[in-house]
Amino acid sequence: MKDNWESVIGLEIHVQLNSESKIFSNAPTKFGSDQNLQACEVDLGMPGTLPVLNEKAIEKAIKFGVAINAEIAEKVGFARKNYFYPDLPKGYQISQLDDPIVGKGSIEIHLGDQEIKTIGITRAHLEEDAGKSIHDLFENETAIDLNRAGTPLLEIVSEPDMSNSEEAVAYLKKIHSIVCALEISDGNMSQGSMRCDANVSIKKKGDKKLGTRTELKNINSFKFVEKAINFEIKRQISCLERGEEIVQETRLYDSTNNTTRSMRSKEDAHDYRYFPDPDLLPLEVSDKFINDLKNNIPELPDDKKKRFIDEFKLSPYEANILVSDIDTAKYFEEVVAKMGKNKDIKLAVNWITGELFAVLNSKNIEISQSPISAKNLAILINLIKNGTISGKIAKTVFELMMDGNKDPQKIVEEKGLKQQSDPKALEALIDKIINDNREKAVEYKQGKEKLFGFFVGQAMKASGGKANPQLINEILKKKL
């Protein structure tokens, strides 16, 4: 961004709550069912039907509010948000306007190793999801799937406290980690369980007045949030520097071409003609109900991070990586537990965040789908720790483990990969190497210390990579 401009960003995150039935009906919410088999008369607003509030949705929303130290409403009411869209057959969405279930709160995001920034949360309100319009199934036609119509949504609205895409992604990841830790949503962005709208505006550096904002609608991955925001910042700056005005509008992000395009003019609240839903009475939330939920909150990411630092002596950076995803944290703790008493925590962290993450990224899968179990990775790490195999051989074993999650101990035995750690055998091997390279040995003794690496390499080559590197170094130093 050019030095004389500043960007201001706020996010609206839509989290599908993982209740077994819809927010106002008993229709199922299972993902992946055949189209239009999970929407009942209530979801479609058919005449003579009445909505009934799902208590589990209330519980899950309040859990989130407690987790971010937010205000919880004493009385919860619902309103009808009126608009026409093909995937909203009843012509209105039941949502909340003036009395959201969760009020002001905040979370902290971590930028780099040390920097911490607080992001304010304006509100989080409950509403029903709409159906889904599918534009690429039939040529020149739009298909409508109403299965998700009525699925409980928690819309989390931030303050405009973020100033670049890095902060926006860090905030989105933090919200993701919280809702997954609370087990109120699976947070699966590819399946639409969590979606994000980004509000982006540009202002002159130092100006207090915010610029006109555009809304980037329904972005479903961390990578696309970053790219969409970056593109929109550049687009708005270019417009302003050409003397053009920014139009308040909703735009769609095209991930194929990495562009945003206009979708519709941005509506304000009055455009939706909100009014209290006549079929739903206000709900009173007691202090006891809130306190009971508060006392049963699972360990949150920030608490888990502190425990990892204290218990496993991790750096804040390492702990932050491991707790950013609930399944990664579980995998790490399972590896540590399976390693037994003489465990090498540092080695475990390095293998998970190094080799394992690389495999997951290359296969584009989550750690819950890892081809290598926590148990087998723990065995591999112990084989390195006790000197059975070297770190180099371990990488070969690791690759072989991916074929059916094989036991690394069996791979080492079957392939004859056990590290050579017999001092007498290694001494004989090194004596031969020194005798075969007498001139280089003399040069080393005369001060050419870089040649030490040459002898280590020759020893490892002669042993087929199986020699214990530590012993090789000790014996070479002694012999040379």
Image (tube, rainbow, N blue to C red):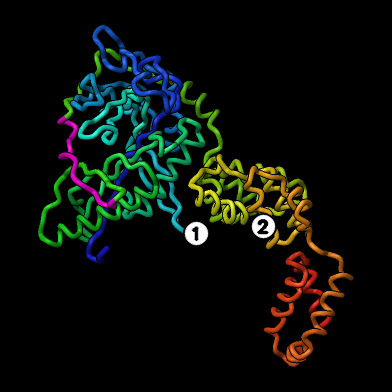
Q: Which residues are magenta?
A: 257-271
Residues tagged 2 and 1 counted as in contact (Cβ below 8 A) = no
Q: Position of residue 89 (x, y in %)?
A: 23, 21
**Is residue 336 visible to us here?**
no
Q: Position of residue 79 (x, y in %)?
A: 25, 22
At a point 15% along the width and 30% down the height, the residue shown is 271
Q: Position of residue 109 (x, y in %)?
A: 43, 49
Q: Is residue 320 left or right of residue 157?
A: right
Q: Is residue 39 left or right of residue 399?
A: left
Q: Residue furthest top?
A: 48
The earlier-in-sequence mark between 2 and 1 is 1
At a point 47% along the width and 39% down the height, the residue shown is 178
Give the Cα separation between the discs numbered 2 and 1.
32 Å
Kind of residue indicated by mark 1: Asp
Q: Is residue 191 magenta?
A: no
At a point 44% along the width and 40% down the height, the residue shown is 176
Q: Secondary structure at mark 1?
A: loop
Q: Position of residue 219 (x, y in %)?
A: 33, 42
Q: Which residue is mark 2?
A: 396
Q: Of the residues tagged 2 and 1, which is closer to the observer?
A: 2
Q: Residue furthest front?
A: 139
Q: Secondary structure at mark 2?
A: helix
Kind of residue indicated by mark 2: Thr
Badge number at residue 143: none
**Residue nearest the viewer, comparing 104 with 109:** 109
Q: Is residue 38 above or below residue 270?
A: above
Badge number at residue 113: 1
**Residue nearest the viewer, comparing 384 with 175:** 384
Q: Residue furthest bottom?
A: 446
Q: Is residue 251 left or right of residue 109?
A: left
